[in-house]
Image (cartoon, grey):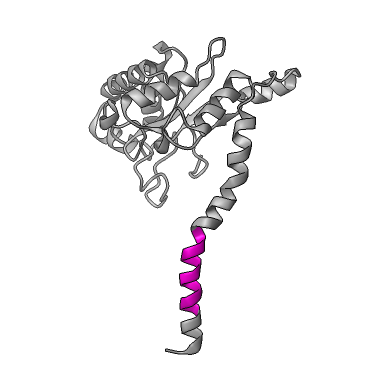
């Protein structure tokens, strides 16, 4: 073994030993400022500030409603600093814990957006183990089901989302299916290569949601050809 290689290994071992301490130091400012951030603040007084705040959807770390990140975001929603919350897979736990998280993000007197990805297929954060029906991907929906059958499946999904307190679903991508596109076509996230078929299945997704508590919209990815 050369002297240089031996020295590199010593440095690697040293890094492994000190890394936890460095991470703790990195997170220390956040740990110190979180309690201060939980102190109530007056809502934005300027109309433009309020309008901009209503457009902001923020995420948070973890699944525990008692943890500081969830409590901080709940306070920001309550005080009108942001317009809502965007849930990701890391926030989704057992049904009871999920209900607690959703409820704490809906303070009295506020109507925040409670958003989540619910396309079906690879992009579905609320799964069977969380008490939700599995949806096919957009590509499989168009391949296996008629628009009328798709409308029924999407209506059931909309009812499940509304019952859980979600009022904004980021759904299938209304783009043409390009088999060469990794993020959309190869992931099954687009309905069809023909625009008229995309329109029919897109309508099947959006129409049932008009009967839910709030309109649940379709998302448009910035990765395709639209």
| Observer-nearest of 70 and 225 | 70
Image location of residue 71, percent across then percent down = 52, 27
| Observer-nearest of 53 and 159 | 53
Check the image and report above or below for 160 versus 24: above
- Farthest residue, direction left: 144
* 53 within the magenta span: no
Residue shown at 74%/17% (left/top)? 47
Quarter of the picture holding the N terminus: bottom left
Q: Is residue 45 left or right of residue 55?
A: right
Check the image and report above or below for 172 versus 103: below
Q: Is residue 76 left or right of residue 12?
A: right
Q: Quadrant of residue 144?
A: top left
Image location of residue 114, percent across then percent down = 48, 23
Is residue 59 among what the camera can see? no
Q: Is residue 178 left or right of residue 56?
A: left
Image location of residue 206, percent across then percent down = 41, 21
Q: Which residues are magenta?
A: 8-19
Residue shown at 56%/13% (left/top)? 110
Provide the major secondary structure of the magenta segment: helix
Image location of residue 219, percent across then percent down = 48, 31
| Observer-nearest of 127 and 198 | 127
| Observer-nearest of 114 and 16 | 16
- Farthest residue, direction right: 46
Is residue 217 among what the camera can see? yes
Residue shown at 44%/12% (left/top)? 213
Q: Is residue 211 left or right of residue 50?
A: left
Q: How many marks?
A: 0
Q: Quadrant of residue 62?
A: top left
């Amino acid at each position: 073994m050369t002297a240089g290689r031996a020295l590199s290994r010593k440095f690697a071992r040293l890094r492994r030993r000190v890394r936890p301490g460095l991470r703790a130091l990195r997170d220390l400012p956040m740990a110190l400022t979180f309690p201060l951030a939980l102190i109530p603040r007056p809502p934005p007084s300027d109309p433009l500030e309020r309008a901009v705040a209503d457009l902001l959807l923020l995420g948070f770390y973890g699944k525990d409603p008692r943890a500081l990140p969830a409590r901080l975001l709940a306070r920001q929603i309550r005080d009108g600093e942001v317009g809502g919350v965007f849930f990701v897979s890391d926030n989704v736990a057992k049904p009871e814990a999920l209900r607690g998280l959703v409820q704490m993000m809906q303070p009295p007197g506020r109507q925040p957006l409670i958003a989540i990805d619910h396309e079906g297929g690879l992009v579905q954060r609320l799964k069977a183990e969380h008490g939700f029906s599995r949806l096919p991907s957009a590509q499989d929906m168009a391949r296996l089901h008629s628009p009328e059958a798709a409308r029924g499946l999407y209506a059931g999904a909309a009812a499940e989302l509304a019952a859980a307190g979600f009022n904004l679903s980021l759904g299938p991508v209304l783009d043409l299916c390009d088999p060469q596109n990794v993020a959309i076509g190869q992931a099954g996230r687009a309905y069809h290569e023909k625009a008229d078929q995309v329109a029919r299945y897109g309508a099947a997704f959006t129409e049932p949601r008009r009967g839910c508590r709030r309109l649940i919209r379709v998302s448009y990815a910035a990765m395709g050809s639209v």
